[in-house]
Image (cartoon, helix red, strand yellow):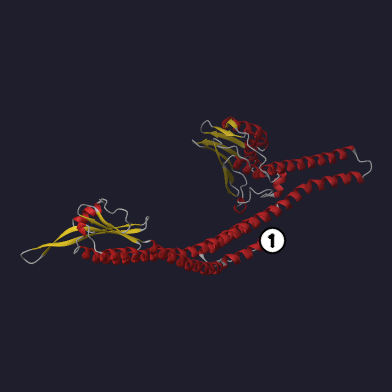
Amino acid sequence: MKKKTKLWAGKIFGAAKTLFWNFRLHLFVLMLAVTMIPCVLVKEMLLAMYRSQIITERGIEVRYSAQVLANQLGTTSFLEGKVNDTVLTEMTQLADIYSGRIMLINRQYRVVEDTYFIYKDKFCVSNDIFACFKGEGTSAEDRNAGYLRYTIPITMTTAQTDSGEMVTDVIGVLVVTVSISSLMDLVDGMRDKADVLLLTILIIAGAAAFLLSGIYARPFQRMLNNLSQVEDGNLDRTLTPHGFDITRKTTETINKMLVQLQELDKSRQEFVSNVSHELKTPITSIRVLADALMLQDDVPVELYREFMGDISEEIEWETHIINDLLALVKMDRGSASLNVEKVNINNFLEVILRRLKPIAQERDIEMTLELFRPVSAMVDETKMSLAVTNLVENAIKYNHDGGRVRVILNADHKYFFLTVEDNGVGIPQDAIDHIFDRFYRVDKARSREAGGTGLGLAITKSVIQMHGGTIRVESTLGEGTTFSVRVPLKQTTVKDA
């Protein structure tokens, strides 16, 4: 059991160590995210603004140059297919400057000029051209294809109103298509520089986050240093809460677990001491009786029989203790499983009370069984019989002559409730919390006299817990004790102890 206690201490240390590294990792990631996410968002926002700005500026330049060209075309006779060399040169230069293409379309939707010489003298019809002939210039951007496209109406003054206003007419359309691939190269270059800057910030932020996470995790580190001593078996060590709320709460939780481990270790030591004492006492008695016989010559038959009878009783007592210990150890190891079957609890209790009736009659103790309704439950009859027998037998043993023992059975739709009540010697309040401990006896002399090993209630509690039930006790010294048991009517799973 000492090895098991140390193992639990090691598990606590391991869990705290994992918690420490998880805390530091999450803190590091959080700090890094808080730094990098805004940087990434700002980078993308700035790049989008830069891209929009340079495309807008390029569009303004192209539209201005195209409008100048359209104004020049309005004063020429290009509708008859006569475009002078100066205008053609300007068209070609404008197309070359912006890596684009320019087409002139007349009223018949025929391409008069095409800097690519592909659609010249062919018809070109589109919604943008229709809109342009109505006097509405259009613009479009195709990011996938990487170009800007503008349609600009070519107007010519055809008349003058009486008020002096000039009347213009759309005589053609100038279609200008320019590539934005060079602009995208600028954006990509800016993105590469931004990525380098972001990577630099990431490295700096990562180093800073690592250092800060270490600083903020120092309370956990101090807690781990203390726990390392606990792992070595120093269970008396307690942790001082400090630092953040999470470290204080974790420390308080670990301190509670350490207290439980200390109690477990103390219980282990007491258990080993009790086992040694309980097993040694009968052996010592046997040895004393045997030595007494061996040291005497010509021992009378009556004395010999008396001593042998005493030795037989001590052996029987030793066997009783060993059997109880084996049953308890078997439950602790989980090797004891429930062999459940449907049991009539009413008849089950009647059989137990009938079996214990001779013991009660010897001391003139009245036993009553109160059954409120028929009850059937899925239980392990053998183990449950052991548990209930221990309760009723204790109620008889630790009672006054002429006392009373009441066994009450009731049930609802989910559980059956068993109450074993006596008006005997009772249990002191400071002992109630320990009566289910192994080898614990309120009155050791009376327990041995009554034939108790100090393991009965520990076995009873283990059996009831195996069935998924609970047991509690209420007692008043000198007035009596009441054990209340609750057990499910059905076992959802066959449980192992």
What amino acid type is highlighted by mark number 1?
Asp
Q: Is mark 1 on a helix, strand or loop?
A: loop
Q: Identify the residue at the far left of this view.
A: 162
Quadrant containing the C terminus in the rendered view: top right
Q: Which residue is label 1 attached to? A: 232
Instruction: Name the foreground residue: 257 vs 384.
Output: 257
Residue 325's quadrant in the figure?
top right
Instruction: Name the foreground residue: 476 vs 172.
Output: 172
Instruction: Name the foreground residue: 128 vs 245.
Output: 128
Q: How many marks?
A: 1
Residue 186's quadrant in the figure?
bottom left
Q: Above or below — where is 344 with respect to 78? A: above
**Location of residue 82 in the rendering, given as x and y in whole percent from the top left corner:** 22, 60
Give the residue drawn at x 91%, y 41%: 299
Residue 321's quadrant in the figure?
top right
Instruction: Name the foreground residue: 283 vs 271.
Output: 271
**Location of residue 421 in the rendering, given as x and y in whole percent from the top left corner:** 58, 41
**Location of residue 189 in the rendering, given as x and y in whole percent from the top left corner:** 44, 66
Q: Identify the residue at the far right of this view.
A: 297
Query: Is residue 239 in view?
Result: no
Query: Is residue 338 in view?
Result: yes
**Location of residue 11 in the rendering, given as x and y in whole percent from the top left corner:** 63, 55
Instruction: Characterize the local packing of mark 1: few (<14), some (14-19) or many (20 or more) Cα atoms within 10 angstroms.
Output: few
The answer to whether 439 appears left or right of 251 in the picture is right
Q: Above or below — where is 170 with respect to 419? A: below
Q: Above or below — where is 329 with respect to 377? A: below
